[in-house]
Image (spheres, grey):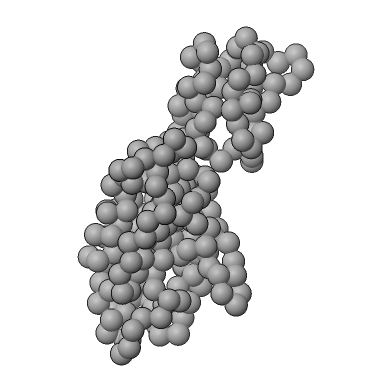
Amino acid sequence: MNIIREETFEIAVCRGATADGCRFSALPIAGLASKLNDLIKASGWPALLSKIRSTTTRAHTRLRLSVAACPNGCSRPHIVDFAFVAAMRPVLPQECTGCGICLRSCPDQALSIPAGAKAPILDENLCLACGRCIGVCPEGQTLCGPSGLRLLLGGRLGRRPRLAVEIPGIWHVCDVETLLSPLLSDLVASYRPGQRIADIILDRWPALIHKTFA
């Protein structure tokens, strides 16, 4: 895992989201961390936190982000303020030979072939959109469906730990700037010394996201 660490924010980046790549990467998102870095610097957040902090920024006041290229989450997306996880859902065939290769490729047992069925079915609640089942079909019938980024908000450790909350849906990679810029602007406008960033996020950002993309 790589970490882009500045005085007022940090971005954890898994190997799959860098030029090194990883065999588990769902999507090529090597430039995403750099884009996030630029957006944060342009938002006014570094200037704000530097202004209200007379000493070195403490770890819990630093904005924390994570970029993960697959649900394995090597960059710990579930315990940061704001995280992107690459996602790729399958489009399953209407009929197949029943070989079961796609079932065995799924680490989450999200695929099954019920008795009498002509093709596998997908349990949406179990599927983490890792994309491993895509491309393994010897008949070439399992295709790539919705792909992009899962969005997680408000994770933290410390005295009262809490896992990040996922905003439903898969967001297009091209929407990152449209998505993040208003959220950062809202954070800069609403942040007060002593507040936990994760609390601000969960209080305000889910509604703001749905308003932005309504």
Q: Is 181 drawn above or below residue 160 in the view shown?
A: above
Q: Residue 50 location in percent, x, y?
A: 28, 81
Q: Is 29 drawn above or below residue 206 in the view shown?
A: above
Q: Residue 116 location in percent, x, y?
A: 75, 14
Residue at the (48%, 14%) spot, across then down: 140
Using the rendered view, name the quadrant where residue 34 is placed.
Answer: bottom left
Using the rendered view, name the quadrant where residue 188 is placed.
Answer: bottom left
Q: Residue 10 location in percent, x, y?
A: 36, 65
Using the rendered view, name the quadrant where residue 13 is placed.
Answer: bottom left
Question: Does the image show residue 154?
Answer: yes
Residue at the (28%, 74%) spot, across then down: 46
Residue at the (48%, 22%) spot, across then down: 135
Question: Does the image show residue 211?
Answer: no
Question: In the image as oriented, which residue stretches furthest toward the right?
Answer: 115
Q: Is 193 drawn above or below residue 71 in the view shown?
A: below
Q: Is residue 52 left or right of residue 26?
A: left
Q: Residue 73 location in percent, x, y?
A: 50, 50
Q: Nearer the viewer, residue 149 or 168?
A: 149
Q: How many marks?
A: 0
Q: Quadrant of the N terminus?
A: bottom left
Residue at the (68%, 25%) spot, across then down: 112
